[in-house]
């Protein structure tokens, strides 16, 4: 059942991405000839109006075929009023942005729903105080942190944020044995590894969470802010991760393919609806941001071509566009192969 849910989620995200392109294209008067969920052989098709809606053999993908648009044969253009290529570069950029925007919008809406319904997070309750740390003999197991230098603390994540914003000494308001107390701590500046494996300096006080979960219900206005910040942070994380991979900080062995995505999504179903929604939002942001990268064959590559035309008032040379598009497909194909090989390696090794 988990695998079926995972495939459904991926198909839905692809559908939502293509829906963004479709809606913006139709709003700008472009005829959409095919709306397909999946690639390859068309299994089921239904003609509604000018558009053929299809379900194709390979579900992990999809496309919208607009009149006058052909990645493989960019020289085949149509100047008819309802064609993609008859539109201005700016209008074409809007169409191209439609898909990634819808993915990022979907993530925002998921975060917004969770923030209103109740976001389960680690409570700011101390589970252990590390020996020889800044907090030793000051904080104790079971203490609940309420404020740090005047900043309200509701979740464990808030502690890190508050420490980053505060200068020593750090004044911490805690609840211990149902009594309110205030203590002062001078954090230690220590070198630690971040999520990218880089050595960075952090202010640490030497505590770990108890594992207790708290549910935070945000009012509508605050939920909007939380959802927006979460969407921005996840977008920055995905973009930064890609750049770290390009510069070699992150190895290609970290690239994952559809097998890992399906497995992780399937595993998330064991932890309830919220876990599935959070993973869906992350994958949706991933799909949106990666499609904006300036790689020919992706939306970002086409945006790059149209920006060139918008700035220079000249169309990109058709031969160059064709070769760059083939190069783009080569890059994507190589990443897909690497991801698939990594997936199989992880399954074999059990990691």
Image (cartoon, rainbow, N blue to C red):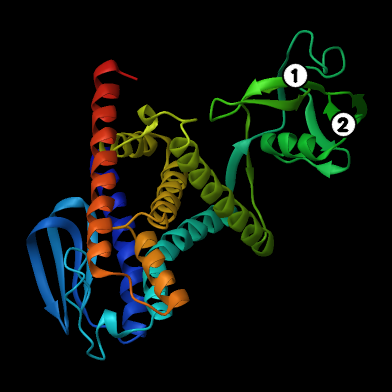
Q: Position of residue 3 (x, y in %)?
A: 25, 39
Residue under the image location 37 percent in, 77 percent down: 314
Residue 1 visible in the shown view: no
Judge from the rendering whether residue 303 lies leftward or rightward of residue 130; answer left or right: left
Label 2: how many residues lie within 10 Å, few (<14), some (14-19) or many (20+)?
Answer: some
> In this orientation, which residue lies closer to the viewer: 167 or 241?
241
Which numbered dot is residue 24? none
Q: What number of labels is visible?
A: 2
Q: Residues within 10 Å of mark 1 (few under 14, many from 20)?
A: some
Tell me how far mark 2 sits from mark 1, CA to CA: 14 Å
| Image quarter in which the C terminus is found | top left
User: Residue 167's x, y, as percent?
Assistant: 88, 35
> Residue 74, percent across and down?
21, 70
Residue 21 in which image quadrant = bottom left
Q: Residue at x 32, y 39 (%)?
A: 261
Q: Is residue 228 visible?
A: yes
Whether residue 140 is situated above or below residue 268 in the rendered picture: above
Q: Is residue 157 left or right of residue 118?
A: right
Name the residue carrying label 2. 172
> Looking at the rendering, in which quadrant would you find the N terminus?
top left
Q: Nearer the viewer, residue 84 or 142?
A: 84
In this view, the residue farthest toward the top is: 131
Residue under circle 1?
206
In the structure shown, which secondary structural element does the residue marked by tag 2 occupy? strand
Which of the two discs, 2 and 1, sits closer to the camera?
Answer: 1
Q: Is residue 284 above or below residue 221?
A: above
**What residue do we see at 29% from left, 35% from top?**
339
User: Quick check: 223 above or below 49?
Assistant: above
Picture quadrant where residue 264 is located: top left
**Mark 1 secondary-structure assignment:** loop
Which of 309 and 258 lies nearest the eye of the viewer?
309
């Amino acid at each position: 059942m988990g695998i079926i849910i995972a495939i459904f989620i991926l198909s839905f995200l692809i559908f939502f991405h293509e829906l963004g392109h479709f809606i913006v294209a139709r709003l700008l008067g472009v005829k959409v000839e095919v709306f397909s969920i999946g690639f390859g052989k068309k299994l089921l098709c239904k003609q509604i109006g000018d558009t053929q809606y299809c379900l194709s053999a390979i579900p992990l993908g999809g496309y919208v075929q607009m009149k006058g648009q052909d990645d493989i044969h960019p020289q085949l253009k149509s100047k008819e009023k309802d064609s993609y290529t008859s539109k201005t570069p700016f209008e074409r950029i809007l169409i191209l942005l439609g898909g990634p925007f819808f993915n990022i919008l979907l993530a925002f809406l998921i975060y917004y729903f969770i923030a209103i319904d109740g976001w389960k997070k680690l409570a700011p309750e101390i589970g252990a105080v590390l020996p020889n740390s800044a907090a030793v003999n000051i904080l104790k197991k079971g203490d609940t942190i309420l404020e740090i230098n005047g900043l309200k603390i509701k979740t464990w994540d808030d502690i890190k944020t508050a420490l980053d914003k505060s200068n020593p000494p750090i004044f911490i308001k805690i609840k211990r044995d149902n009594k309110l107390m205030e203590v002062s701590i001078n954090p230690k500046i220590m070198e630690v590894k971040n999520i990218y494996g880089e050595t960075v300096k952090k202010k640490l006080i030497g505590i770990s969470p108890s594992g207790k979960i708290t549910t935070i219900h945000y009012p509508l206005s605050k939920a909007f802010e939380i959802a927006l910040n979460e969407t921005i942070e996840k977008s920055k994380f995905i973009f930064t991760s890609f750049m770290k991979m390009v510069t070699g900080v992150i190895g290609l062995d970290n690239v994952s393919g559809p097998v890992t995505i399906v497995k992780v999504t399937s595993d998330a179903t064991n932890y309830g609806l919220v876990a599935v929604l959070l993973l869906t939002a992350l994958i949706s942001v991933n799909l949106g941001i990666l499609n904006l990268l300036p790689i020919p064959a992706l939306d970002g590559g086409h945006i790059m071509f149209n920006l060139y035309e918008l700035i220079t008032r000249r169309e990109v040379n058709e031969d160059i566009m064709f070769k760059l598009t083939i190069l783009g497909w080569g890059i994507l194909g190589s990443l897909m192969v690497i991801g698939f090989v990594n997936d199989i390696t992880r399954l074999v090794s059990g990691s």
